[in-house]
Amino acid sequence: MRPIQATVSQHALAHNLNVVKQLSPNSKVMSVVKANGYGHGLFNVAHGLHAADGFAVLGLNEAIDLREAGFTQTILLLEGVFDARELNIAASYHVDVVVHCQLQIDMLQQASLIAPLHVHLKMNTGMNRLGLMPEVYLQALNALKGCVNVSGITLMTHFATADEALGVEKPLAIFNSLVKHLPYAKSVANSASILRYPETHLDWVRPGIMLYGATPVSGTPIEYFNLKPVMQLTSQLIATQILAVGESVGYGQRFTATQPTRIGIVACGYADGYPRHAPNSTPIAVNGKLTHSVGRVSMDMMFCDITSIPDATIGSPVELWGNIVAVDAVAEASGTVGYELLCAVAPRVPMKVVD
Ligand SMILES: *Cc1c(COP(=O)(O)O)cnc(C)c1O
């Protein structure tokens, strides 16, 4: 069998969830498990995060899968429903919905549901993605208060710059000025906000990336936040080559040896989710020793320099990211973020759960 594998650590998930709980002891934790648990497998992470108070997903199918697997926590649809038919299904599975626009309010008002729903009313505080404008927010809240299909309301917003110098001051002030004293649960903090802004830890917090042990703040490694990597992406060398000075490896001859160089051929390519844009010198570990990639990543294979690892040979273990190589380091070298790399791990990569 092709030796590539992703390993998901339940211990690391539980550890990272505890970091959230220690930082936000008075908040309930809504673990964000969208995008197949940030690429780790929905159930792989839901089990590791079973001590969370809730799970947030995008699709009704994911919410139903979690319910049918026996998860009794709050489950939230982060974009709400996409049509009126979904409202009744959400209601019958006791799934909460975000309400982010007038159309969704209309749907709720016109529906006749088996049971009323708990809604999370989203305010647009400057991200300008989803959410009702502050000027119409209280009016929307009033409409939902009087709606027979609504059993409870949580007030929420989402920050555009919690991970950047700009911070959350302005959007938080907009949110607070309208709803601070209203008697509803409130939910505003993503990972960056949990790690950087205690004043945003309200009734709920909504961690995503930090639970998976990747950084929400580019340039700040996870050790700084006491987080542990959850996914280890590993493979093996399936061939070795020796390049004489002037010889190249891979498509486009993007790496040419300037000294005699030993090359390891790794069973991992962009069809596995490894970024094709990773440049020469992206960190990678062989036999537990740090080295770097060379040449262009191909569909099923990539290359690394094993000149300094003489015992490296066919079958030697390779870590693409995980414990020796931070996923954030591969992301940074490739001009992206850990989020994208984790989510992009391909379905063909076997996933194994370990304690
Ligand atoms: C994805 C998402 C989160 C989690 O964000 P992280 O940066 O991964 O912590 C929180 N809230 C909403 C609304 C989201 O869409």
Image: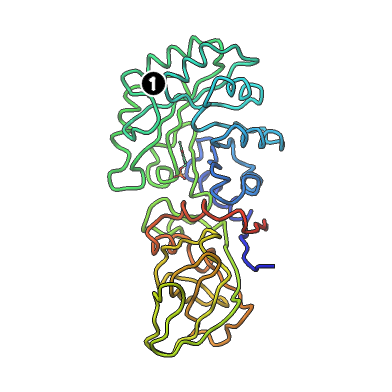
Q: Is residue 98 depicted above or below 241 in this figure?
A: above
For residue 282, which quarter of the picture? bottom left
Q: Residue 65 in the image: x percent, y percent? A: 67, 36
User: What residue type is disc 1 on?
Assistant: His
Q: Residue 162 in the image: x percent, y percent? A: 36, 43
Q: Quadrant of the N terminus?
A: bottom right
> Crowding near pointer 1: few (<14 within 10 Å), some, many (20+)?
few
Question: What residue is shown at x 60% (from left), y 69% (from top)?
Answer: 235
Question: What residue is shown at x 54% (from left), y 51% (from top)?
Answer: 16
Q: At numbered mark 1, what does the secondary structure look like: helix, strand or loop?
A: loop
Q: On the picture, is 170 further left or further right than 90?
A: left
Q: Residue 247 in the image: x percent, y percent? A: 42, 85
Q: Residue 45 in the image: x percent, y percent? A: 61, 47
Give the labeled residue for mark 1: 181
Question: What residue is shown at x 45% (from left), y 55% (from top)?
Answer: 338
For residue 67, which quarter of the picture? top right
Q: Report the coloring of the rendering.
A: rainbow
